[in-house]
Structure formats: structure tokens, C-alpha cells
Image: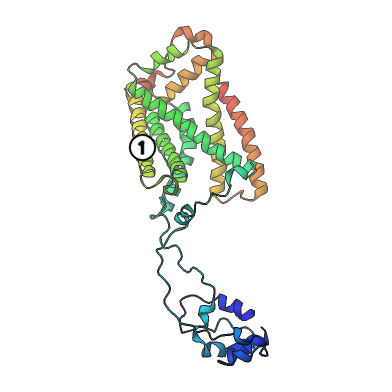
């Protein structure tokens, strides 16, 4: 019975040359069996030795992820400072800086979610690529939209302030919306 | 290993008598011939399971919701929400004809309840994502990764989120 167990462990590829060195732990199992019957390895159960050759390619294959990861964290820390600063010390430069860093942070976050959930194993080869391309398109438009908004309109910081101010006090809504910081809209 | 089996293997041709002759003519000579294994086309794990039409084991639905996983998925959900707001606002304002003050004045005519709800829906995801984001950055410094610390910082973060939301709503 022990012999059957040992033979079961033999790889299928052994058709004549039996590697016995790793198997004999006790003296009772000697190599004489395989000297007389070199093909005894074939008594082993037909284990399927054909392992998966090329698993489905993940979208995360290839490339050094470390630089992107570090850049993401640096941007997150930066954003922790930029958002309060943009509201406390408003200026056109702060508006543009906020626009760029906010959209980059949003883009990287959504990209991580898309890569995690819209996988080739579920959706096939085409849809994940379409999703990532669409995300890039949306992010470019969002960044363009925010820059345009800062350039030709009141800017994101002012917009939030206006929205906030006039929605806490509905009795002021008759006054109309004026930008809080006049200097922010000077172009 | 049985002694009979050893004799069977060690002495070719003498297996007829191995069991004391009781087996008799039932034992016959077996010839072992080696041949190369049949070549099979390589099939990966997912293809094989699709071919066999196997159902998938339950995974997400049977896992007990815990504060660790719930806070984590909420971080992702709030992040997607705030991104939705930012992208919708920026792309929308680019497409709409009038300037923002015009729309702001138009929106100010809505009911106070609706306006307060809108402010809450903006403030809460932002506050949650910010506070949990700080927690994530602490983890990225390889600090606070013990499970007791994860729980403690989780509760602290929830308290900070509530405070920050209230602070933002009262601005």
C-alpha cells in the first residue's frame, strides 16, 4: 500500500528513468522494484500533468506599479492641503491648481475601480478597454471643463461658496448670486 | 507493504504461486508498455469550468458584513460619488449656455428641505472620503495595521466624519 502511494506521486514524464532519490525515506523501500520494472511508474494514477499554460491576461500585467502608487499617495497628501488652502486663500492660480489635482485624483481613483471590477475574465477582451478609454475621455473633458469654468466663469471655489451661502439662508435667495471673492473673477 | 506484493514484484514470472496458488488461473501475465501521453490542448481554469458548466461558489453574498469591509467599500462608494459630482458639474457647466450665477439664482428658488438635502449629499461623502483617506494614508506608512488599531481608527474616523459633516453643513 505504501508502494502504491509512492508510485502515485511519480510524475507522468518518467518513462524509463526513475528518479528515486527523493522517495526512499525508510530502508524497506529499495530501488530494486524499479530496476526490474522500469515502467512501474505507469502504474501511477493518470494525473493530469497539463497545467494551465497561459491564464487569461490580467489588465494589470506588465509595468512598474510603484511609481504610480507613490504618485497617487503624494497627490492625496497634496490634496489634503490644497482644498482648504483654495477656500481660505482664493485666487485664479489656486483654482487651476485645485482643478488639476482634483481631476487627477478622481481619475486615478475611478481607474482603480474600473480595473478592479471591469475585468476581461467577466467582460471579455473589448469592454474593459472601452471602459478605460471612456474614463480617460471623461477625465479630459472634466479637466477642460473646470479650467474653462475658472477662466470664463466664477471658478470652482467661488461656485461652491455661492451654492453654500445662498442655500443655507433661503431668505437671501432673492438677492441673487454674487461671487464672494471679487478678485477671483478678474481675468 | 504486504509481503505477497513484494514477492509479486521482485520475482517476475512467479506470480502464479504468490498467493499460495489459491488464485489459480485468475492471475495472468500483464505486459506493461510505455507510450507518450496523449497531447491535450492547454485549457485554463476558467475555460475548463465553463466547459463543465459548473456553477460558481457563493462568495460575496455569504460573507458576513463587517466594519472593516463596510468602511472600505464605503470609501470607494463615496469616492465615486464625489467624482460623479465633480465630473457632472464640470462637463455640465461646459455644455450649458449661461454662467453659473444664473443657475445658482434659479436653484435658490427650490424648497429649503431640498436645498439642505443637496448640501448634505455633497458634504457627507466628501467628509467621509477625506477622513477615511487620512486613515488610508496612515496605513500606507505601514502604521496602524493591527486589527485592533484598524477597529479603533475606524470608529475614530466615523466620529470625525460626523463632526466634519456638521461643520461643513453649518458653514
Residue B27 in picture, x, y percent from top left: 59, 85
Residue lying at 56% horizontally and 28% vertically, measured from the top left: B124
Q: Dot 1 surroundings within 10 Å: few (below 14), some, or many (20 or more)?
A: few
Reading the image, the residue beneath label 1 is: A134
Closer to the camera in the image, B57 or B156: B57
Residue B11 in picture, x, y percent from top left: 58, 93
Residue occupying the far front of the picture = B25
Closer to the camera in the image, B99 or A2: A2
Colour scheme of this structure image?
rainbow
Left/right placement of residue B5 relative to residue B112 reads right
Quadrant occupied by the N terminus of chain A: bottom right
Q: Give the structural element (helix, strand or loop) at label 1.
A: helix
Closer to the camera in the image, B9 or A32: B9
User: Can residue A91 be seen from the camera position used here?
Assistant: no
Residue B162 in picture, x, y percent from top left: 62, 29
Left/right placement of residue B90 relative to residue A23 reads left
Residue B9 in picture, x, y percent from top left: 58, 88
Note whether A137 is above or below B25 in the view shown.
above
Residue lying at 45% horizontally and 28% vertically, measured from the top left: B85
Quadrant occupied by the C terminus of chain A: top left
Amino acid at each position: 500500500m505504501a508502494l502504491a502511494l509512492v508510485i502515485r506521486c511519480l510524475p507522468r514524464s518518467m518513462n524509463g528513468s526513475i528518479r528515486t532519490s527523493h522517495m526512499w525515506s525508510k530502508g524497506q523501500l529499495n530501488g530494486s522494484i524499479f530496476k526490474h520494472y522500469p515502467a512501474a511508474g505507469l502504474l501511477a494514477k493518470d494525473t493530469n500533468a497539463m497545467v494551465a499554460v497561459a491564464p487569461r491576461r490580467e489588465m494589470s500585467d506588465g509595468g512598474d506599479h510603484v511609481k504610480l502608487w507613490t504618485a497617487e499617495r503624494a497627490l492625496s497628501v497634496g490634496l489634503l492641503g490644497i482644498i482648504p488652502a483654495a477656500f481660505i486663500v482664493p485666487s485664479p492660480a489656486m483654482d487651476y491648481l485645485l482643478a488639476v489635482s482634483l481631476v487627477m485624483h478622481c481619475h486615478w481613483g475611478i481607474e482603480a475601480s474600473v480595473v478592479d471590477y471591469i475585468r476581461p475574465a467577466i467582460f471579455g477582451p473589448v469592454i474593459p478597454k472601452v471602459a478605460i478609454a471612456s474614463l480617460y475621455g471623461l477625465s479630459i473633458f472634466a479637466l477642460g471643463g473646470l479650467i474653462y469654468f475658472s477662466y470664463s466663469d466664477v471658478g470652482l471655489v467661488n461656485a461652491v461658496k455661492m451654492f453654500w451661502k445662498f442655500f443655507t439662508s433661503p431668505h437671501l435667495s432673492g438677492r441673487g448670486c454674487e461671487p464672494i471673492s471679487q478678485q477671483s473673477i478678474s481675468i | 507493504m504486504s509481503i505477497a506484493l513484494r514477492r509479486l514484484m521482485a520475482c517476475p514470472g512467479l506470480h502464479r504461486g504468490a498467493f499460495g496458488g489459491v488464485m489459480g488461473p485468475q492471475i495472468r501475465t500483464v505486459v506493461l508498455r510505455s507510450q507518450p501521453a496523449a497531447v491535450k490542448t492547454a485549457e485554463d481554469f476558467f475555460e475548463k469550468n465553463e466547459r463543465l458548466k459548473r456553477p460558481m461558489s457563493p462568495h460575496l453574498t455569504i460573507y458576513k458584513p463587517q466594519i472593516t469591509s463596510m468602511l472600505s467599500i464605503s470609501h470607494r462608494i463615496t469616492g465615486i460619488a464625489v467624482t460623479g459630482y465633480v465630473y457632472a458639474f464640470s462637463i455640465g457647466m461646459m455644455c450649458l449656455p449661461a454662467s453659473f450665477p444664473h443657475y445658482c439664482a434659479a436653484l435658490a428658488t427650490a424648497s429649503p428641505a431640498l436645498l439642505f438635502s443637496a448640501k448634505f449629499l455633497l458634504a457627507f461623502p466628501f467628509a467621509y472620503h477625506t477622513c477615511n483617506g487620512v486613515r488610508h494614508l496612515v496605513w500606507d506608512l505601514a502604521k496602524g495595521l493591527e486589527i485592533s488599531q484598524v477597529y479603533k481608527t475606524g470608529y475614530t474616523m466615523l466620529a470625525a466624519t460626523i463632526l466634519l459633516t456638521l461643520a461643513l453643513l453649518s458653514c
